[in-house]
Image (cartoon, rainbow, N blue to C red):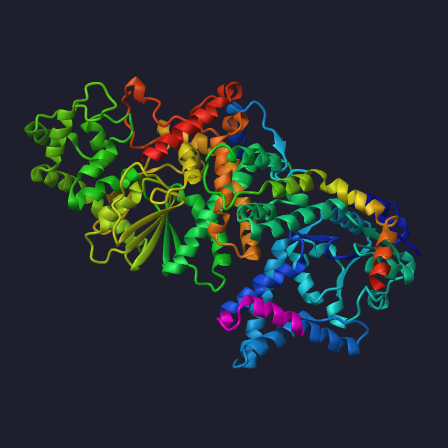
């Protein structure tokens, strides 16, 4: 407890307010290093010679990850809602495949 | 009876709570309902288990073959059980015993039983690492438990109830549960509906006052409803999105090495209740620093295994954090129990500098080290660093026209190249060297005694681990012990090895950097050099630095630490307290790194491209807020003197991390300027 008090005192000397947030964002991304930051960085990689990144991230993959992190939940919610109404497509496909 | 489908945990728990008066028993599916997996595919657990078996079986049984064989045996068991029981189920102990018996044909049944226990323990440990209790469902169970409802967990799974009980206990749910039913025990599954009468009879339940929650529309919805049980199906869209993200990273990683480290970090991310709001420093530790420190220790472990090193020493004070990480990672990285013995060694540049001169005297390179910091100026600084008495050296200085205050560093007013020449001639003087050896002999003797108590001379090879940067501690340690016939070969591992000063590498004294090594050009990796002090302060143990080794009696030695009331010690303690949440984040992430690496079977080098990317993004082009948060408040170079250097040398090494955050906010091009400066500096080296 005394150690915590001392820590708070130390922090308060240098930080105006201790902000609290989650380590994984609501989009299951890294707090402080989200997919958008990787995308921005990749654009810089293309201009500046920065170094070895194991072949680089590939813009297509970055866009995929960014979309999944950003719209993933909404996409799955939509999929769940449309699962029953759209099931006829699946049945139709199966029947066509059977023929 | 019908069932209801829900798309979030909150709605299903609210629905259950509303009906609490209408049921006496609550049954829950285990996987993907009350426990969720970090990974998207449960079968991925089989791969590390196969590797565990491969380690014991030898090269004739590669992991892929073991997995294929296991799946085949499981299929045979399912078919066999399907003929005698209502469902095509398999039971893990039977399948695994069969598998082990077929692989280890020459072993006795008692050996197989022992092996089965080891494999089962390993598989359950991996499974347990991957499982996280789902917070809202656990809250619901607690609430229902408080209302005297019976809580029963049900699963269609190849693990029997006894094994599931271990997983549930490890997740901290054991006390909340009245019983566990697994299809592996009876070959009666939820999916066919044959499990429900069994559960009713076993626990004397009334279907009319029974509620079931699960995730499968057939097993947990249709079948219980047919049996007259109310059922709720949880099809959590958040969880589906999370698993889809993990799956995409998993698929990308083999094709693009860049994403391997990102995949590791995705699996390391806290989920459910683990992901509570935290301090920004904790997040920086967890999401930025932890992969560096963990991957470095991982690399050290791999090298120890490859070079058959039996003892590892972590140098104080930065080594304390690395030692803690080692203690978490070693059991996983050495599942055979052959991990090298790890020790925390109290060393420092100050304490070792003197003993290093006791045998060979003070050479040109060692003397130059004392004048590397711009604040060091004259013989007094040299004596402070090497623990020498100034008075005894004065006659020797006079012989070469030098005085105690003669400026020997080009960073200060009054520097003259002729003084440098005189100083070099002084270093070649045998009488001067004899005096140096005389003064440092006692400290060297104390060092030998200390190292002997730490069993340093017991092995032919030892690994020494430090954060970096010039390898000065290892240099002094080797110089102080190399005269002994039993001195070990030292394999040095540092996080980054700076290229600005030569290291006396030899067959018995090697050093290499992981993130950056001056012998291998890696520009992205070199960016770690722009924030050396930051990494040093983060890893630094919260105890005062070692100042000297002293002989106590005829045989013992004692360690002399910096006094706690010293201004530098106070500043360090303050800095250490500031970074305490950050270190907590690193240590919390270490266990998750271990679990991720075990599943993925990655080597430390697989993570390197991602670490390089983090370095560029977070160190070369940080946000102003990140600099404000992470920039150290106090940093002390124990070799540095107290003389103010010339103005043009005061900002040597200043970079983004020494720039005021407000400047970075207003002048973002400063980052590119500092980046270009670093690039030029690297190309010159």
Q: Is residue B68 magenta?
A: yes
The picture places residue B244, in percent across and down from the top left corner, at: 69, 48
- Residue that appears at 79% across and 50% down: B235
Mainly helix, strand or loop, the magenta region? Answer: helix
Q: Is residue B530 magenta?
A: no
Is B41 left, or right, of A99 in this rendering?
left
- Residue that appears at 8% across and 37% down: B429
Q: Residue furthest right?
A: B1
Q: Where, quadrant-wise, is the C terminus of chain B in this rendering?
A: top left
Relative to residue B605, is residue B673 depicted above or below? above
Residue A48 visible (yes or no): yes
Residue B397 versus residue B509: which sits nearer the camera? Answer: B509
Tell me the quarter of the picture where residue B162 sits: bottom right
The picture places residue B4, in percent across and down from the top left corner, at: 88, 50
Where are the magenta residues, as a range?
B56-73
The picture places residue B411, in percent across and down from the top left corner, at: 25, 23
Q: Where, quadrant-wise, is the N terminus of chain B in this rendering?
A: bottom right
The picture places residue B143, in percent across and down from the top left corner, at: 79, 47
């Amino acid at each position: 407890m005394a150690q915590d008090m001392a820590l708070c005192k130390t922090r308060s000397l240098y930080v105006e307010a201790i902000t609290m947030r989650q380590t994984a964002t609501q989009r299951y991304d890294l707090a402080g290093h989200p997919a958008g930051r990787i995308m921005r960085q990749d654009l810089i990689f293309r201009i500046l010679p920065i170094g070895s990144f194991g072949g680089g991230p590939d813009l297509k993959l970055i866009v995929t990850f960014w979309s999944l992190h950003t719209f993933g939940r909404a996409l799955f919610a939509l999929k769940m809602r449309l699962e029953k109404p759209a099931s006829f497509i699946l049945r139709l496909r199966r029947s066509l495949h059977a023929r | 009876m019908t069932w209801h489908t829900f798309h979030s945990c909150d709605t299903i728990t609210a629905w259950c709570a509303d009906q609490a008066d209408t049921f006496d028993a609550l049954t829950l599916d285990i996987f993907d309902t009350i426990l969720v997996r970090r990974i998207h595919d449960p079968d991925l657990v089989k791969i590390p288990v196969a590797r565990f078996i491969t380690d014991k079986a030898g090269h004739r049984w590669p992991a892929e073959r073991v997995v294929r064989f296991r799946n085949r045996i499981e299929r045979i068991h399912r078919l066999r059980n399907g003929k005698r029981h209502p469902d095509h189920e398999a039971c893990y102990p039977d399948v695994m015993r069969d598998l082990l018996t077929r692989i280890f044909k020459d072993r006795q049944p008692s050996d197989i039983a022992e092996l089965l226990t080891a494999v089962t323990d390993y598989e359950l440990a991996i499974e347990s690492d991957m499982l996280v209790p789902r917070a809202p469902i656990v809250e619901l169970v607690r609430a229902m438990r408080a209302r005297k409802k019976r809580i029963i967990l049900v699963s269609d799974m190849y693990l029997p109830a006894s094994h599931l009980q271990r997983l549930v206990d490890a997740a901290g749910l054991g006390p909340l549960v009245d019983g566990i039913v697994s299809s592996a025990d009876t070959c009666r599954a939820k999916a066919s509906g044959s499990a429900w009468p069994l559960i009713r009879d076993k626990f004397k339940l009334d279907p009319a006052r029974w509620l079931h929650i699960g995730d499968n529309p057939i097993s947990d919805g249709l079948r219980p409803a047919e049996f007259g049980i109310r059922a709720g199906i949880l099809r959590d869209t958040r969880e589906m999105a999370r698993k889809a993200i993990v799956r995409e990273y998993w698929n990308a990683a083999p094709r693009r090495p860049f994403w391997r480290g990102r995949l590791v970090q995705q699996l390391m991310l806290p989920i459910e209740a683990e992901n509570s709001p935290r301090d920004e420093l904790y997040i920086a530790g967890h999401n930025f620093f932890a992969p560096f420190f963990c991957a470095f220790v991982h690399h050290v472990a791999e090298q120890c295994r490859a070079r058959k090193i039996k003892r590892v020493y972590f140098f104080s004070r930065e080594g304390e954090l690395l030692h803690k990480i080692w203690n978490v990672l070693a059991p996983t990285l050495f599942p055979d129990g052959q991990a090298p013995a790890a020790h925390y060694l109290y060393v420092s540049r100050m304490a070792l500098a003197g003993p290093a001169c006791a045998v060979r005297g003070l050479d040109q390179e060692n003397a130059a080290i004392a004048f590397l910091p711009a604040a060091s100026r004259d013989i007094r600084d040299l004596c402070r660093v090497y623990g020498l008495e100034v008075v005894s050296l004065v006659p020797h200085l006079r012989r070469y026209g030098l005085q105690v205050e003669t400026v020997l560093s080009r960073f200060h007013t009054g520097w003259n190249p002729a003084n440098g020449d005189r100083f070099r001639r002084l270093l070649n003087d045998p009488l001067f060297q004899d005096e140096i050896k005389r003064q440092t002999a006692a400290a060297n003797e104390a060092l030998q005694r200390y190292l002997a108590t730490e069993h340093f001379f017991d092995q032919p090879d030892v690994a020494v681990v430090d954060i970096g940067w010039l390898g000065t501690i290892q240099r002094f340690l080797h110089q102080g012990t190399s005269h002994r016939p039993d001195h070990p070969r030292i394999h040095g591992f540092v996080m980054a090895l700076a290229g600005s000063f030569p290291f006396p590498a030899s067959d018995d004294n090697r050093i290499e950097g992981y993130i950056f090594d001056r012998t291998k050009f890696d520009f992205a990796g070199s960016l770690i050099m722009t924030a050396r002090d930051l990494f040093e302060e983060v890893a630094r143990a919260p105890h005062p630095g070692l100042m000297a080794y002293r002989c106590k009696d005829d045989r013992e030695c004692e360690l002399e630490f910096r006094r706690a009331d010293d201004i530098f010690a106070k500043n360090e303690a303050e800095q250490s307290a500031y970074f305490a949440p950050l270190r907590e984040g690193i240590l919390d992430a270490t266990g998750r790194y271990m679990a991720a690496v075990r599943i993925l079977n990655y080597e430390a080098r697989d993570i390197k491209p991602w670490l390089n990317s983090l370095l560029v993004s977070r160190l070369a082009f940080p946000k102003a807020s990140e600099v404000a948060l992470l920039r150290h408040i106090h940093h002390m170079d124990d070799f540095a003197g107290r003389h103010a250097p010339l103005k043009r040398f005061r900002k040597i090494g200043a970079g983004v991390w020494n720039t005021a955050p407000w400047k970075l906010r207003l002048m973002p091009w400063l980052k590119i300027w500092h980046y270009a400066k670093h690039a030029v500096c690297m190309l010159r080296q």
